[in-house]
Image: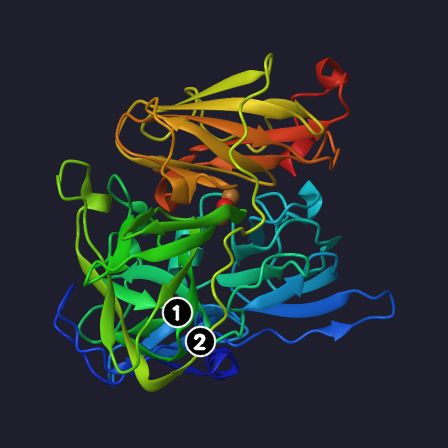
Amino acid sequence: LLSLAALSAAGTFLGGCSRGGGNTGLAFTNRLRIPPLATSQTGADGAKRFALTLLPGGRSEFLPGRITMNTWGINGPYLGPTVRAARGDKVRMTVTNRLPETSTLHWHGMRLPARMDGGPHQMIEPGATWTPEWTIDQPATTAWFHPHLHERTALHVYRGLAGLFLIDDPAGPRLPSRYGVDDIPLIVQDKNLDDDGSLPTGGVDEGTFGLLGNTILVNGTYDPFLEVTTELVRFRLLNASNARVYRVGFADNRTFDVVAGDAGPLPGPAPVDRVKISPGERIEFVARFTAGETVVLNSRGEPEKAANDIEEDDFDLLKVVAAGRLAPSDPLPATLGGTATVAAPAGARTRRFALSGSEINDKDMDMTRIDEVVPAGALEIWEIDNTTYAHNFHIHEVAFRILDINGAPPPAYQAGPKDTVFLAKKAKARLLVQFGEFVDPAAPYMYHCHLLRHEDKGMMGQFVIVEPGSEDRIPRTIPGGH
Ligand code: C2O
Ligand code: CU
């Protein structure tokens, strides 16, 4: 039971003022909320210190005049602040758990030692504080953070625990980067809200895919619009839904340029009119607007309607309203710093992962079992063979390239470094995976399906990174599991 103190500690989240008509044909009456930037303090050791507190008992007004009780948030009633730091920064996170139950906070897309990763082993008990620190050393990225408690991730994320972690690279290309002005986060989530505004959570662990919502929130805003004031606007799209897959584009099918995928920049802009994004994935794109126009960003289901429930529905996401005069933007650079797709080296080790209903290689997640032992710095081919309905596949710590999906190279917008790949029904993907150098034979990283119901059911495995040559001597069990 939540106390009144907990309710007021989390404040009230004001998200909505009027209600539209369903999946499409919204009225776009609410200004898109931009998550605040997290403030930091620089300690004596030079580390940037950020404080993130997991809070229950939030009061969020998603639907007009209807308060959704007991949303969860980070430093607020719903979602979290956006953390922004640069390559080369040392960061120290103070993560405090004020929830009535254990949780974790995982840095999705961050390349860091496994004990700092915030996976299922780095549990934070109620009332406790966890203080991971690391030095950021990876290309410019839109990373994010969310709980990863084994068997409870779907519920914790659905209630509202998630936030963006932006990494800038001072040596990277010049892209629009004024946060909230021409650099706009878009955290897309589907919810089921009852008419009274309540957020029933029972379905998150039911059915084949868990809960599929019919109401879209963007940055926690229902029925949103965004005013833009520059010719070029960069959007950072994060699918933070439990299971839905979106095909995002503009209602007039205009072309826009993808500049980065999950784990860093593309070699150059990839023009598209629609992108597919599954849970956990991020896509950065730059769109051009003309003064005075309005255009709707939407999601259109797979036209064949053949795939499955998570890819088929249509949604409006956001109306973009361009000001009567737009400030000129620098032209989009022709090269973005990403390297062109690399071929697999001869003799690269191949590992195979068969995905069934909720298992990987016929195994459920076991916190005490090490499934794979990988030498530090390895470049390996991981073959993912989906034998059933839709899944996706996420690997912690690494960056990978999609070599092929069903034998064909990926579209240009997915050819950059990634950490999560969508696998439609019966799809096969081959990934070229670059592992890092953070050796720790007793602290595993995760790989798993990022459809959160599947992850919770055990569609997850563990790997450790070890000194090359020591693989055969590594214990395959973790005493106690954590
Ligand atoms: Cu976004 Cu293992 O998680
Ligand atoms: Cu799955």
| Three-letter amino acid code at the position of disc 1 | Asn
> SS for tag 1?
loop
Residue for point 65% across, 39% down: 482
Counting residues from the start of the chain, the first of labels 2 and 1 encountered is: 2
Whether pointer 2 and pointer 1 mark residues with C-beta atoms closer than 8 Å, the reply is yes
| Residue nearest the observer in this picture, 174 or 429 | 174
Residue for point 58% across, 52% down: 107
Residue occupied by mark 2: 34
Is 292 above or below relative to 401? below
Q: How many marks?
A: 2
Query: Which label number is shown at residue 219?
Result: 1
Answer whether residue 102 is visible to the viewer in this image. Answer: no
Residue for point 19% across, 39% down: 308
Instruction: Tell me where residue 287 appears, x and y as whole percent.
Output: 36, 64
Q: Along the horizontal axis of the image, is 75 left or right of 40?
A: left
> SS for tag 2?
loop
Instruction: Tell me where residue 439 appears, x and y as whole percent.
Output: 75, 33
Q: Does the residue labelled 2 lie within 8 Å of ligand 1?
A: no
Query: Which label number is shown at residue 427?
Result: none
